[in-house]
Image (cartoon, rainbow, N blue to C red):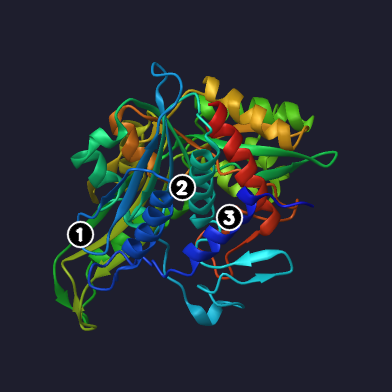
Amino acid sequence: MTVSDLETEALDFVRALIRIDSVNTGDPATIGDGETRAALFVQERLREVGYETHLVEPWPGRASVVARLPGSDPDAGALVAHAHLDVVPVEATDWTHPPFGAEIHDGMLYGRGAVDMKDFAGMLLAIARAFRRDGIVPRRDLIFAFFADEEAGGVWGARWIVQNRPELFAGATEAISEVGGFSLPLPGDRRAYLVATAEKGVTTATLTARGHAAHGSRPTDDNAVVRLARAVVAIGEHRFPLVRTATSERFLEVYGRASGQPFDGDDLDVDLQRLGFAASVIGAGTRNTASPTVLTAGGKANVIPAAASATLDVRVLPGQGEAVRAQLAEVVGDDIAVAWARDIPAIESPVDAPLLDVLQDAITAEDPDGTVVPYLLPASTDNKHLARLGIRGYGFVPLRVPADFDVFGQFHAADERVPVDAVYFGARVTARILRDA
């Protein structure tokens, strides 16, 4: 296979970015300057080909970069193509290859950020440079954005820029970023390419049980720890009802048709098992969920505490905010107080937007039998922050991978890796999307 200059540069940039340790611990005391070093790397590469860049650093070490390439149609809404430059922490002893070495073994590129998401950052950087060097004028203005702090909620990245520098996204109507674009197997050596047209909302609930404090040697009937434990177990065993959103309905329709096996059974959970390793992610997009994550009670073994609490990570489908609160209150019972915080609403973009036709055409050019399939992402991306400016977000980082390669499983995992051929494929497809959108 002949590798183009675009593909070569994309891979080189992905490797260079992986080698910049930009771990985001979420704790300002332990976060270094890696995000700024990565942003400066991107800024310099963009400046080399004549871009005017905006380096935004609201806190030392937490920099983002934004640049714009004018399009040929001034009336067309601008398209934001964005990636984040931070990565989650690593336990190096769990890795077979150095997490910041960007080593290639057996056709796989290893490193923290190989999938989440320095792969796309490297592709976008190479494409931005190629368009400028080759005089390619896209139809729409392209806004290339490389954000800090996505892994901790975008506080110093996309959220801060949306709140304080919204002019950088003037005229933008749509955005493309993670999580989607990678292939899932279909019968007959064909592939479906997921596009996230919706994302669950994120909220936090704190359960509090109260009783009266007592000596540990004298058990009480209203032990707060016991009552809280019962509530936590009830939540762990509870299944929220199936909700068919516009996005999940489109997934069932398109994937069912493409696979030749319509989802028309009485038990959707069973039907989804045929998706293999993707079943849990797609399934999580069909229900609201609540996961107990933090328990707090007592401080001394011989003291029964007067209160005990549990924190829940609650993921909410579009339009389901009030229903989730009511259902959760019913599950835990009247004697458990529920407090809600950190409410980030769900987003849902049109599943029939012209941009999806562009995605399909770009995939078809590289994989004639490939089918783009909308799905609902049960997690969050920076598209939620851009949505506050009326920008409709889509998750699509195109990667053609082997049928048994679980891209979902690479996120935040040890030995995170991506096939080198998939990076080349992603660069080619994304270039077509950005040129033709």
- SS at mark 1? loop
**Residue 134 has which mark?**
none
User: Where 33 falls versus 372 (above or below)?
Assistant: below
- SS at mark 3? helix
Going 32% across and 52% down the picture, which residue do you hit? 64
Of callouts 2 and 3, which one flags the residue occurring earlier in the amino acid sequence? 3
Q: Nearer the viewer, mark 2 or mark 3?
A: 3
Q: Residues within 10 Å of mark 3 (few under 14, many from 20)?
A: many
Of callouts 1 and 3, which one flags the residue occurring earlier in the amino acid sequence? 3
Of callouts 2 and 1, which one flags the residue occurring earlier in the amino acid sequence? 1
Going 63% across and 40% down the picture, which residue do you hit? 269
Location of mark 3 (residue): 9
Q: Which of 302/285 is in front?
A: 285
Query: Which amino acid type is marked by label 1?
Result: Trp
| Distance in Å between CA atoms under marks 2 and 3 | 49 Å
Q: Which of 26/8 is in front?
A: 8
Query: Which amino acid type is marked by label 2?
Result: His
Q: Residues within 10 Å of mark 2 (few under 14, many from 20)?
A: some
Q: Residues within 10 Å of mark 1 (few under 14, many from 20)?
A: few
Query: Which amino acid type is marked by label 3?
Result: Glu
User: Where 225 falls versus 235 (above or below)?
Assistant: below
**Residue 238 has which mark?**
2
Report the number of discs. 3
- SS at mark 2? loop
Q: Are marks 2 and 3 in contact (CB under 8 Å)?
A: no
Q: Residue 344: percent from the left, percent from the top?
A: 30, 41
Location of mark 1 (residue): 59
